[in-house]
Structures are given as structure tokens and as C-alpha cells.
Image: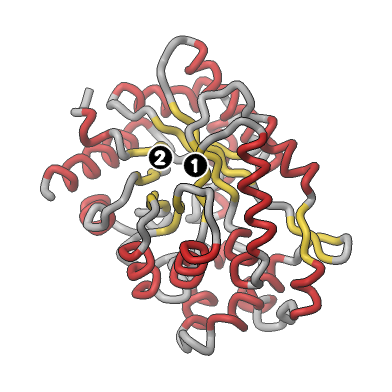
Amino acid sequence: MVDGRYTDRLILGHMPLVGISYQSREKDAEYRRRFSDAKAMREVVDAAVELGVTKFAAASPDSSSLASLHIHVLDTLAGEGIEIEMIPCIGIPLRIGGGGVDAFRRWATYLAFEESESPGVRRRILDDPILNFREGWKHRLPASRPYDEADFRELTVDWEMFDDGLEAFLGLPVSYIEPGSETDFLAMTGRIDLLGEVVDRIKEHGFGGVLFGVHHAGMTIPRLDEELDGFDGYLTPLNPLGVMMFPSKASAERAVRSTKRSVFAIKPLAGGRVRTEEAFRYVFGFDIEGCMIGCASTSEVEENIEAAVKAQRAL
């Protein structure tokens, strides 16, 4: 067991365990095959517990084919008397005029807002290695029309679907709920009212903590810090490459350093593109509350936790 002073800030991420590698479609398929077996999933979780990790990310059952199995594994762990905390991500199901919000038009809208202040953001978004896993990313995004002010006024949330996501975690040891990265869209379009209702619904369901998931920290964090109350902080990418840190790595870093709310780092390894030692030296150079680490094997758990602990000890 590693000293709890250093593992208390570590969170075992869920993405590899539900079949998402951020490396290749072949790797995704390999993960889905491997972790369709609850025993294989449990081995990774147990390896983290053995090293002192008590916090685990999760996602609503409709987010992937393996999300329900992952929730079941964590529920079983808690039922065995092992003290754990869960941080589930619940996507915010956005609607405009009765239909869903198109992902490419949503990202085109981000560009429309961000390019005036960050001229390099278009190339950064088009070249981002994680975003490029979306089919036809570099072709479909430039061809997509941003949403406009009339669309922003029509924005709403499918509250029944959002509530269903919350209800999947009732009775489980949840420390925070993470409304997903649709947060960025609502913040940029000025629909802070809907984010306020998101917070209210989470608390009405009996959950106390709220962490917003953001990928456009440089714009979203300052705005929410100023305009919204009742939530605890943010989960946002932090890695030396600046992957998924928008509109620029520098603006995201400034926002993380400036906020007085809690910050939890995600994607510290940039989907396996950064060496563990470099990643955690960088991440723990910030005053963060926690760091989420995705692992697809017991050996990855051991390697990543050892590197994260070493980086914290060196501070």
C-alpha cells in the first residue's frame, strides 16, 4: 500500500475500462473485448485499491456499452465493505428546436467564439489527436455552420434523460457529479441559467458535490467563476502537450491557476502520448485537488501510480 498522502489525490479513470483508448479504433476494440469480462475489469480496479486509490470515475449507463458493467463492478466493490468514492460523468443532453445538438456544429460554434481572441485555435482543434478520432473530423468540422443567437435562445436540456443518468447512481458512494463537457457550450452561449438548473437538479437528487467537465478552460472557467454559484470546481485536461486544452494551452493554464475552486486534472497522459514521469511532474506543478488516470491493465496501474506518487514526493 502506497502512502495515502500521495494516493488521496489519484482517481482511476473509466475510459479504458469502457473501451476508449484515445489511440486507435483497433485499440478501442481490444479494450471492449477485454473488459466485457467483469473479472478483467475488476482486476484493474483491485490493483488500484491495493495501491491505495479510493476514488473512481464512472459514466451514466447510456454513455457506452460497458458503462453499466463498470458501475456494477464499483457497486460490488463498495458492497464488500471497501470504502470508495465515485465521480460519475453525466452528459448534458442538449436540444435546439426539439432536436439534438450536432457535435460538429457545436465545435464550429466554439471556433466562432474563440478565434477572435486565439487565432491559432482552429489549427489546434483540427490537429488535436483526441478530437481526430471523430469520423471525418478535419473535413466535417470546417464545413459545419456555427449555431447563432437564435439557436442559443432555443437551447434547452432533456431533463428527463439527465435525471435518468443521475438516478443510475442513487445509493452509490458518490462524492461528486460531473456534468459533461456540454458545459462549455452552455457557458459560451450565455445559457448560465441552464447550468444553474443542472446544479439544482443534482442537489435535488441528493448529491452534494458538483464538478463541471470543461475542455475550453481558458474561456469557461473565468466565466463560471464570475457568473455561477453552488458548484465545487472543474475537471479539465492538463498535460504537457496541451491536448484538449482550449482555446490555448497558456489560457487553460492561467484559468487553472487563477480559480479559487477545486480543479481535478484529466487526460494527464494525453491518451498515452506523454511519458508518465513528464506528465505527472507537469500536472502536480499545479495546485490541483486530484488527478484522473486511465489504466487498461494492472501493470499500467502500477506504473502510473508509482510515477504520480514520485512526482508528488518531489514537490
- For the image, the number of numbered tags is 2
The answer to whether residue 63 is above or below residue 116 is above
- Label 1 sits on a secondary structure element that is helix
The residue carrying pointer 2 sits among few (fewer than 14), some (14 to 19) or many (20 or more) residues within 10 Å by Cα, namely many
Q: Are marks 2 and 1 in contact (CB under 8 Å)?
A: yes
Q: Is residue 89 visible?
A: yes
Residue at 37% across, 61% down: 259
Q: Position of residue 12 (x, y in %)?
A: 41, 37
The answer to whether residue 103 is above or below residue 63 is below
Q: Amino acid at mark 2?
A: Cys
Tell me where residue 89 sits by quadrant.
Answer: top right
CA gap, disc 2 and disc 1 = 6 Å
Q: Quadrant of the N terminus?
A: top left
Residue 223: which disc? none
Q: Position of residue 185 (x, y in %)?
A: 63, 66
Q: Position of residue 23 (x, y in %)?
A: 48, 55
Residue at 48% across, 66% down: 226
Pick the front one: 33 or 223: 223
Tell me where residue 313 sits by quadrant.
Answer: top left
Pick the front one: 60 or 37: 60
Q: Of all residues shown, which one is farthest toward the left?
A: 314
Q: Position of residue 166 (x, y in %)?
A: 66, 36
Residue at 56% across, 50% down: 26
Q: Amino acid at mark 1?
A: Pro
Q: Is 280 left, or right, of 272 in this rendering?
A: left
Instruction: Report the residue marked by disc 2.
Output: 295
The residue carrying pointer 1 sits among few (fewer than 14), some (14 to 19) or many (20 or more) residues within 10 Å by Cα, namely many
- Label 2 sits on a secondary structure element that is loop
Residue 16: which disc? 1
